[in-house]
Image (cartoon, grey):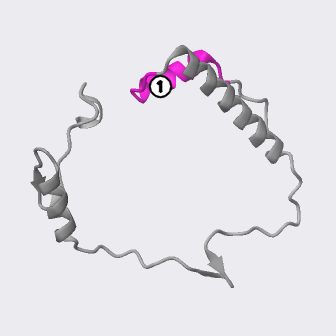
Amino acid sequence: MGERMKVDKDLIQEISSIMKLEFSEEETKELTEETNKTLSMLKALSEVDTEGVEGTFYGRVNGQARFRKDEAISNEEEVEALLEATPTPTSVDHLIEVPAILDDGEGGA
């Protein structure tokens, strides 16, 4: 791994602006410190010699995945209950319509 990336206040503010998040000075300072600690840990992990160590894979027992089959299910009762519980629900084809997050033309919103 090359030179360690250093996260500073400006980078946190740039990323939060892109994500449309606002942080106080204290939160920005804390995020900067925590992010740099995380990057330090990742750098240390990248330096561990794993030559000859067999990989492990989440969700596998005896070489077989133990996940449920990914199937679409119709749960109209839950959708209807949710629509009735919200103040001004609108739905299209049993999908709940929500307000756009990006209102300045980004992402087609």
Between 6 and 75, the residue placed more toward the observer is: 75
Quick check: 66 left or right of 38?
Answer: left
Q: Position of residue 65 (x, y in %)?
A: 58, 79
Q: Position of residue 13 (x, y in %)?
A: 51, 19
User: Splitting the image into 4 quarters, where does residue 1 fall?
Assistant: top right
Magenta stretch: dominant secondary structure: helix
* Residue, disc 1: 16
- At mark 1, the secondary structure is helix
Q: Is residue 32 above or below residue 37?
A: above
Between 85 and 75, the residue placed more toward the observer is: 85
Quick check: 39 left or right of 80?
Answer: right
Label count reads 1
Quick check: 42 left or right of 47?
Answer: left
Q: Quadrant of the C terminus?
A: top left
> What is the span of residues highlighted in magenta in the rendered image?
7-22
Label 1 crowd (10 A; few <14 / some 14-19 / many >=20): some
13 is within the stretch colored magenta? yes
At a point 80% along the width and 47% down the height, the residue shown is: 45
Q: Is residue 6 above or below residue 48?
A: above
Q: Amino acid at mark 1?
A: Ser
At a point 30% along the width and 73% down the height, the residue shown is: 72
Between 38 and 46, the residue placed more toward the observer is: 38
User: Splitting the image into 4 quarters, where does residue 22 fall?
Assistant: top left
At a point 85% along the width and 66% down the height, the residue shown is: 53
Q: Position of residue 35 (x, y in %)?
A: 65, 31
